[in-house]
Image (spheres, rainbow, N blue to C red):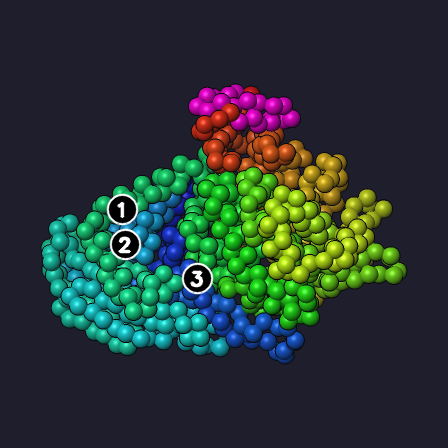
């Protein structure tokens, strides 16, 4: 734990007391989003101390030219940057002639900010004393509408407490923004048009290179004691990329003045370029017709609907409850499944690190959450995203010398092209291919919807199998196939040979592709003929695949009776983490990369990631042996690590460890375990937090088309509950130390298995086990 200032609360993230040192961390933690856009919790008014400004639009990116010391064949030409979008929230404020800036105030008292997760809004309040002696009470509420996802709403209230005040509100929209992390200090936005009239303004800008057009808009109204004054701006200033209005209002001591600002974006992803401004005007007119209070209630209702299905309750442990709801809230803010062109970036709308792009995290961690808490079409959209980028994956592989339709899905992407800028990841962390195939298997296993495979998925599986066939090398020394020069999930080992996880996944991918080819040939003959003709697949090639899969080398230690993470793992100095001086942690911030690579320390689950995916391929005794061998070398310096270890610890009845790992994954950002939350939250790993409860403590698995549970409960909890949308029926599971209860919302009986015993659950009847 690196910080401990977030106040425990079941439904809200709360900070009390203003501390400039916490501003950037809080900007991440209090971020808001609605699936289409999002923003860090920057102050609306000017703030001259350290801050990380960030507003983001889903699907809008810029190909920032790769910056490397020297070029390698096949190297990505650019790194896809999620763009800091034009600023629509800005409101400069003057009070009796003094610019309001929390950094220069004489005093800040009673500061509080709250992210209300239940209702989906962000609120800030405080009393400020300015240098000119004016004391004001400030209340600000902001939300991004779930129902109208091009709309954001701000209400900024100021009450003079000790004297009358002339307040000047200066709202603006500004496309002259920069990214925190530009490789070449390039400008990303080209202004095209500025338009304003009365209380409305529009700035149209286009991204360089990618040519996304965005209209940023605002509409303002001034209120006094909650009554709209109908003011027009005293003056308006416009440049090529910014519009700012000015409103003056005389406010008596104790009166409450406010500016109400509607703003947001209309984008060329969803509208023709020629109608972006008229589309924005339509959003404004609809918002004005509803009014602030109705929009807020609409937001509350929309979030209530989300929570009705996705909430997890925890009794007796407020920090654990706050943690899981924060994770679920951020996942829903980032992606709602409406658009198959979009995906889930590791930082979502909370920061720029990792480029905001798609990683293997989506398939390995996020799809289970979305499958179980939403309609299965949402997960299918995520699979469709990869299918739509299959041609690019084949192109990526061809750049590296692979042929015949072999596909290498990118480690990082916005449009299907590889755009990761670290060679040991780009060229070597090829296991990401396996996660794509596993997600197809996992989707069918959970939903029972096989139609995706003959329609789209089989083409993906064939292309991935072709890659593994070509990537494997026959070793005459071993008389087996090996995979050389890779990086596994443990990124603290680069360019190793025969990473167990990678080799096992490659073998499984080929076997699974062959199995699905046979099934589609038998049951979907027209699809089979179409696909075989399209990809030009012959029996001779299939036989070569089978040969590779059948003789895949898996490194194993007879001495330790475990699969080895890679061929050279036992050559390392095997000093366990608990024997490492705490002053050396985290090693990724204390050690040179050379030292890390020579160490035995594991960033995240690697061999154990394989045991997580393919649990049914191994006995519980094997899992325990591997867990006990590898976990002591794991430093958990990846956000993706604690959740997998929590699930496996629970499976092994190591409940103290399971709970510790759960708390770490659920509060990774709230408590800033890795000392980096100011860069943004770890969105994709938050799905792993959900899995820690449902698959870890709940023991949920899908076996032979049925749900199985092995419920456990940490000593710190008195009970917990969750819901699962399993094949279009919603099952609620509630666990205490003494019993597990099931309730079914559906139309037909559902048989589940609890600790191996069949339990019949009838619709609208409570069953206690």
Residue at mark 3: 59
Considering the numbered disc 3 on the image, is that residue within a helix, a strand or a loop?
loop
* Residue 81 vs residue 246, the one in the foreground: 81
Question: Which portion, as a residue range, is magenta?
Answer: 750-768
Residue 464 relative to residue 135: left or right = right
Give neighbour class at mark 1: few <14, some 14-19, many 20+ (Cα, 10 Å): many
- Asked whether residue 678 is in view, the answer is no
Residue furthest to the bottom: 70
Give neighbour class at mark 2: few <14, some 14-19, many 20+ (Cα, 10 Å): many
Q: Position of residue 559 (x, y in %)?
A: 85, 46
Q: Disc 3 versus disc 2: distance between alpha carbons?
A: 22 Å
Q: Position of residue 441 (x, y in %)?
A: 61, 46
Residue 90 relative to residue 596: left or right = left
- Asked whether residue 220 is in view, the answer is yes
First reached walking from the N terminus: tag 3 or tag 2: 3
Magenta span main SS: strand
At 35% from the left and 39% from the top, the residue drawn is: 304
Residue at mark 2: 153
Residue 247 relative to residue 764: left or right = left
- Label 1 near label 2: C-beta < 8 Å? yes
* Residue 707 vs residue 155, the one in the foreground: 707
Name the quarter where the C terminus is drawn: top right
594 lies above or below 501: below
Give neighbour class at mark 3: few <14, some 14-19, many 20+ (Cα, 10 Å): some
Q: Quadrant of residue 23?
A: bottom left
């Amino acid at each position: 734990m690196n910080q401990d200032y977030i106040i425990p609360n079941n439904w809200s993230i709360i900070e009390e007391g203003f501390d400039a040192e916490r501003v950037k961390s809080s900007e991440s933690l209090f971020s808001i989003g609605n699936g289409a856009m999002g923003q860090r919790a920057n102050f609306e008014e000017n703030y001259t101390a350290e801050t990380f400004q960030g507003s983001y639009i889903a699907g809008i990116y810029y190909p920032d030219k790769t910056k490397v010391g020297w070029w390698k064949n096949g190297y990505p030409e650019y790194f896809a940057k999620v763009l800091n979008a034009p600023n629509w929230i800005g409101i400069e404020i003057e009070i009796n002639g003094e610019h309001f800036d929390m950094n220069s105030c004489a005093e800040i008292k009673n500061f509080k900010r709250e992210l209300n997760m239940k209702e989906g809004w962000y609120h800030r309040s405080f009393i400020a004393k300015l240098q000119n002696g004016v004391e004001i009470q400030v209340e600000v509420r902001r939300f991004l509408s779930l129902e109208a996802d091009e709309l954001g709403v701000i209400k900024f209230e100021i009450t003079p407490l000790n004297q009358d005040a002339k307040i000047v509100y200066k709202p603006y929209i500004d496309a002259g923004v920069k990214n925190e992390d530009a490789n070449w200090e390039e400008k990303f936005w080209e202004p095209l048009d500025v338009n304003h009239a009365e209380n409305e303004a529009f700035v149209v800008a286009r991204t360089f290179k990618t040519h996304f057009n965005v209209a940023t808009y605002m509409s303002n109204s001034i209120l006094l004691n909650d009554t709209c004054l109908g003011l027009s701006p005293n003056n308006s200033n416009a440049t090529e990329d910014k519009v700012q209005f000015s409103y003056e209002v005389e406010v008596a001591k104790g009166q409450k003045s406010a500016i109400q600002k509607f703003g947001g974006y209309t984008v060329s992803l969803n509208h023709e370029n020629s109608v972006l401004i008229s589309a924005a005007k339509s959003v404004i007119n609809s918002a004005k017709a509803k009014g602030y209070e109705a929009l807020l209630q609409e937001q509350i209702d929309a979030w209530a609907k989300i929570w009705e299905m996705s909430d997890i309750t925890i009794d007796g442990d407020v920090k654990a409850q706050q943690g899981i709801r924060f994770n679920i809230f951020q996942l829903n803010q980032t992606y709602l499944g409406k658009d198959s062109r979009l995906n889930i970036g590791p930082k979502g709308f909370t920061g720029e690190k990792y480029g905001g792009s798609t990683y293997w995290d989506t398939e390995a961690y996020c799809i289970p959450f979305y499958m179980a808490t939403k309609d299965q079409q949402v997960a299918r959209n995520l699979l469709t995203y990869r299918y739509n980028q299959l041609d690019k994956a084949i192109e990526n592989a061809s750049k590296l010398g692979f042929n015949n339709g072999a596909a290498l899905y990118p480690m990082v992407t916005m449009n299907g092209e590889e755009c990761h800028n670290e060679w040991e990841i780009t060229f070597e962390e090829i296991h990401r291919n396996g996660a794509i195939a596993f997600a197809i298997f996992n989707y069918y296993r959970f939903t029972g919807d096989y139609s995706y495979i003959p329609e789209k998925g089989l083409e993906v599986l064939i292309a991935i199998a072709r890659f593994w066939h070509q990537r494997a090398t026959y070793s005459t020394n071993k008389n087996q196939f090996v995979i050389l020069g890779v990086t596994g999930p443990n990124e603290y080992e680069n360019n190793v040979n025969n990473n167990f996880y990678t080799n096992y996944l490659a073998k499984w991918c080929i076997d699974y592709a062959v199995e699905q080819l046979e099934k589609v040939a038998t049951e979907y003959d027209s699809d089979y003929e179409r696909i075989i003709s399209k990809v030009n697949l012959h029996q001779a090639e299939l036989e070569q695949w089978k040969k590779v899969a059948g003789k895949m080398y898996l490194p194993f230690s007879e001495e330790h009776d475990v699969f080895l993470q890679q061929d050279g793992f036992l050559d390392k100095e095997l000093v366990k983490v608990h024997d490492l001086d705490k002053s050396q942690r985290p090693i990724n911030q204390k050690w040179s990369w050379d030292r890390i690579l020579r160490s035995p320390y594991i960033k995240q689950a690697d061999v154990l990631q394989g045991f997580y995916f393919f649990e049914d391929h191994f006995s519980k005794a094997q899992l325990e042996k591997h867990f006990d061998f590898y976990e002591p070398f794991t430093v958990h310096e990846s956000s993706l690590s604690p959740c997998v270890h929590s699930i496996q610890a629970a499976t092994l009845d190591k409940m103290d460890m399971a709970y510790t790992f759960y708390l770490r994954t659920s509060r990774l950002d709230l408590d800033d375990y890795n000392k980096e939350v100011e860069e943004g939250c770890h969105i994709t790993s938050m799905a792993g937090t959900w899995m820690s409860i449902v698959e870890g403590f709940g023991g949920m698995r899908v076996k032979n088309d049925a749900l199985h549970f092995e419920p456990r409960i940490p000593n710190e909890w008195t009970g917990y509950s969750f819901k699962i949308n399993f094949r279009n029926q919603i099952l609620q599971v509630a666990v205490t130390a003494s019993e597990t209860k099931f309730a079914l919302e559906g139309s037909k009986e559902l048989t589940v298995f609890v600790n191996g015993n069949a339990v019949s659950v009838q619709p609208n009847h409570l069953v206690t086990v």
